[in-house]
Image: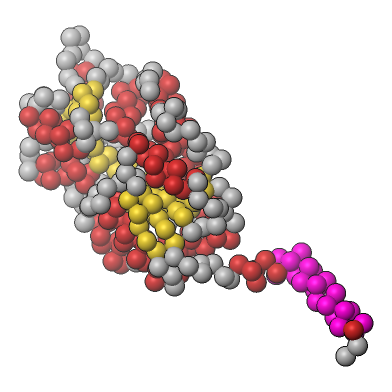
Amino acid sequence: MTPNTSTRRHHLRKLALGLLAACGLGGAWAQGSYPERTIRIVTPYAPGSMVDATTRLVADGLSKRLGQPVMVENRTGGMGMIAMNALLSAPADGYTLLTDTPASAINPTLHKEQARYNPKTDVAPIAQFMRLPFVLAVHPDVSAGTAKELVSLLKQPGSQWNAAGAGTSTGLVTDLFAIQAGVQLPQVPYRGAAPAILAALKGEAPVIFLDSANLAPHIQSGKLKGLLVTSDARQDTLPSVPTSAEAGFGNFKPVTWFGIFARSGVPPHILKQLNEAVREVMQSSQTREYLKARGATSSDMGLDEFRSFFHAEIDMWADVIRKAQIKQ
């Protein structure tokens, strides 16, 4: 082979690869290499929490489907910003991911000084794991037997009913209900779900909005009265509690959810691959049974659907924060 022949073949090969790339085939060839090493999922929630447990269940399923280890790293504190910063400071290659809740959509509006990121441009939503409805419950001493009756009580002159607050998300759910119902519902803040539930059980703050997994046992035992649940259908764990629509509050549909994110800039084919893998995990019988036992349902949102959902969450909670005049 002459040097000129070798050179010509080299140029022809480069030209062919360029044409393949232009047609999208070369990109497809290059896309088959992800993942080549361990994937890390950071989460701002503590070991043993439901977010942590669900993340580990998903990580195990992803590892089996992707053929690489998927490790979970708990980075708690800083109102979720320690974990978020770990994501935003990592390369945009799909090897560092984040699991989070509605807090990821809320924090940049509510905590502007600490959460200095734009949730619509700095993070890339990949997939939603699950959805868990909220429940409105009251202490048995509250005379209201329905959500409508509770609103009537709250509108009476001199109403002194308070709600137990269990964190940012549940506090905003309370604010959203008060705004839509046209009532005042002061909140007493507590350090988490357990002390908030205890306050409701004691009647110290007799109204509470919390996820169904936390409240179901107390409603089942009769220690609290469930007035509505924000799911489309009644919950198997709370068959006597009406949905928001049945209770006359069809526009009140907030849910808590867990989702997985990348930082912006991760190639679209990697986001799509991860979305499809997560959806496979969430539709497995093992995962569905795990969630059902906790009053949750698995999610099957596509990539674009979850992005639209996440952006709508950002806008909705920003509007609640503005209307309720909540300060940082």
Residue at (39, 52) in percent of width and height: 42
- Is the residue 172 above or below the residue 36 in the image? above
Q: Toward the viewer: 255 or 21?
A: 21
Q: Toward the viewer: 11 or 293?
A: 11
Residue 241 can be seen in this image? yes
Q: Quadrant of residue 18?
A: bottom right
Give the image location of residue 268, x and y in percent: 59, 56
- Magenta stretch encompasses residue 7: yes
Give the image location of residue 216, x and y in percent: 16, 44
Q: Quadrant of residue 320?
A: top left
Which segment is the magenta one?
4-25
- Is the residue 316 above or below the residue 26 in the image? above
Residue 232 can be seen in this image? no
- Is the residue 248 above or below the residue 56 in the image? above
Q: Quadrant of the C terminus?
A: top left
Q: Would residue 318 appear left or right of 75 to someone viewing this image? A: right
User: Which color scheme did the rendering employ for the protein?
Assistant: secondary structure
- Magenta stretch encompasses residue 59: no
Number of marks present in the image shown: 0
Residue at (41, 28) in percent of width and height: 111
In terms of secondary structure, what is the magenta stretch mainly?
helix
Q: Quadrant of the N terminus?
A: bottom right
Farthest bottom residue?
1
- Is the residue 116 above or below the residue 44 in the image? above
Q: Quadrant of residue 209?
A: top left
Q: Would residue 318 appear left or right of 57 to someone viewing this image? A: right
Residue at (36, 66) in percent of width and height: 61
Residue at (21, 36) in percent of width and height: 192
Farthest top residue?
157
Give the image location of residue 103, x and y in percent: 37, 38
